[in-house]
Amino acid sequence: SEGISSEGDILDLAVEEKLLQKSGAWFSLNGDNLGQGRENTRQYLKDNPEVKEKLRAGILKKKGLDWLGTVPPDGQGIRVEILKRVYDELLVNARIPFTFHTQLVDVTVHNGRAHEAICAGKSGLFAIRAKVFVDGTGDGTLAARTGAPWEKGDARGHMMPGTLCSLWAGVDWDRVRESGLGTSNSRLEEAIQDGVFTLEDRHLSGMWPVGATLGGGNIGHTFDLDGTDEESLTRAYLWGRKSLREYERYYKTYLQGFEQMELAATGALLGVRETRRILGDYVLNLEDFKRRAVFDDEIGRYSYPVDIHLARPDRESYEQFRKEYSTLRLGKGESYGIPYRILTPRRLTNVLVAGRCVSTDRSMQASIRVMPGCYITGQAAGVAAAMAATQGADTRAISIRELQARLKTMGAYLPNA
């Protein structure tokens, strides 16, 4: 869904296309940062200077901006409303048709190929026919309904919890920094023992500057979530909004610099970390992470750690998370390859997947699911779809060398291609 990263990536594909967005903007998680927190984005741009410069040249310089961030020293917080307008203008200027508040509801299949995407908008139901479809739903909805096999959750069906991101006003960031208490769990255990929280959730990602006095919160979890079920999502929204009252008390009472803060907004969309994993021609797995795998059909290199949020709010689950998150990570300059084959669902010849629903095991889904990973797979899927559509080929028949060459001209980091 958030698949736009630089102007060239949507202008260079000379094919007819249409983009659908279920919300009212191309960036919908109010108050979040560029990437899951800041760590993966900072490392990604450091390891991929070509992408960083392309982002600057493609979007920011054209808009008279040096960066979308606001607050030193890292400046990675997104100016959400500016970014929404930038994305709007990029698509309008590229003359790419798109509609907001439009959602996929079904797929018609002819001879094992996706034939029509049945969509719902304010005007009612309508169908879109295409030679090639890219499933960027996050849930693998189109691929699953076309007949691709998939997995979901761990061996017991448990999935990572979601988070309703939040935007807070009135934060004194100078006082926050001077206090040394930080923005997350420095006094969380004390607050739990004092009965502040309904759930003993010890995993608090925290809050980051997204304006002079604004904070973007990756705060709290919605447990027992199934992001493919509307009743489960509804319960998650209700709990997400309710639980923020408890976190507001924690920040105001136990930390410093947050005494005058107030909740300005909650995310237009719930942050869902895990649903379906579409099974493709290759399943990227934890051993690939450990061996820093190299593939002949690489579409990018990646370095974010394995980040499986705890499925239950108890101490044992949190300690397991801490152990995995501290050990299943890569060193400076290290990365693993992302193969094109994780974008090609089994049984399907004209569908590609991108984002967190690509073909991985659960551990690797927890690494690739964040924004830079979605960008890499989305960029490659878009280029590959254009190649397949113009060549009249299925998604497996395109030239990998040509795909890699095109991606490199767009700034993709492919040292092995």
Image: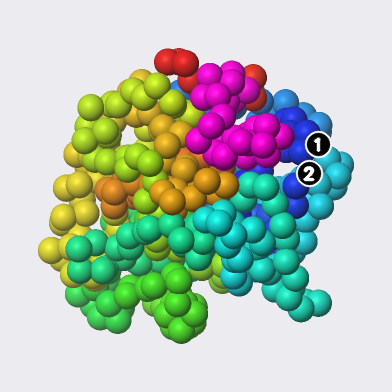
Query: Could you tell me which residue is drawn at 55 percent across and 49 percent down?
Result: 351
Near-viewer residue (391 or 62)? 391
Near-viewer residue (10 or 233)? 10
Query: Could you tell me which residue is drawn at 21 percent across and 54 percent down?
Result: 321
Asked whether, in this view, residue 375 is left or right of residue 99, the answer is left
| Gap in angstroms between the C-alphas marked 1 and 2 | 26 Å
Asked whether, in this view, residue 128 is left or right of residue 43, the answer is right
182 shown above or below 158: above
The residue that mark 1 highlights is: 63
The residue that mark 2 highlights is: 16
Asked whether, in this view, residue 405 is left or right of residue 281, the answer is right
Q: Answer yes or no: is residue 346 visible.
A: yes
Near-viewer residue (391 or 206)? 391
Q: Main secondary structure of the magenta part?
A: helix
The kind of residue tagged 1 is: Lys
Element at badge 1?
Answer: helix
Query: Could you tell me which residue is drawn at 81 percent across and 52 percent down?
Result: 97
Residue 208 falls within the magenta-colored stretch? no
| Residue numbers of the magenta segment | 379-408
Say which label, 1 or 2, has the lower sequence index: 2
Near-viewer residue (351 or 77)? 351
Element at badge 2?
Answer: loop
Query: Could you tell me which residue is drawn at 39 percent across and 72 percent down?
Result: 226
393 shown above or below 144: above
